[in-house]
Amino acid sequence: MWTSLKKILPAKIRGLGLAKEIEFFNLRKNWDKILGEALGQQFQGKSQPLKIKNGVLLVDCLNSIWANELQMKEDLILAKVKSQPAKPVGLEKIRFIS
């Protein structure tokens, strides 16, 4: 009897504990697109997610000016991230650093 990978893969990924890693990979891959849609294209290429720990997304920015600008728009960015199909589960806050 054959079983499709579409049915097997999600359970195996969860079993190996890789679900959070895949969610973060998708967030990193789509970060500039998310910022562009939430704030405009001038915000693309100015920051990059580093990690998620205890529900906080740590984002590295080009400099303190961009970190401050993005921090002021945290609510808009967080709402856009949470609206993504492959959103990180349990994400509650974003911290921008330079």
Image (cartoon, helix red, strand yellow):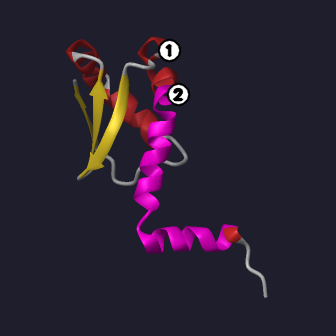
Q: Secondary structure at mark 2?
A: helix
Q: Who's the residue at 52% across and 24% down the image?
A: 37
Circle 1 crowding by C-alpha within 10 Å: few under 14, some 14–19, many from 20: few
Which span of residues is magenta-colored?
6-34
Residue closer to the observer: 82 or 65: 65
Q: Residue at x 45, y 61 (%)?
A: 19
Q: Please, what secondary structure does the residue beneath circle 1 have?
A: helix
Residue 64 vs residue 62: left or right? left
Q: Tell me the residue that label 2 is attached to.
A: 33
- Would residue 67 be counted in the magenta stretch? no
Name the residue type under label 1: Gln
Q: Quadrant of residue 50?
A: top left
**Residue 49 image point, x, y percent:** 35, 36
Quadrant that contains the C terminus = top left
Q: Which mark is residue 94?
A: none
Type of amino acid under label 2? Lys
What is the residue that sits farthest to the right in this orientation? 1
Question: Which residue: 30% across, 47% down?
Answer: 52
Query: Residue 42 appears at what percent x and percent y?
Result: 45, 11
Q: Which residue is mark 1?
A: 41
Q: In terms of secondary structure, what is the magenta stretch mainly? A: helix
Q: Nearer the viewer, residue 61 or 82?
A: 61
Q: Quadrant of the N terminus?
A: bottom right
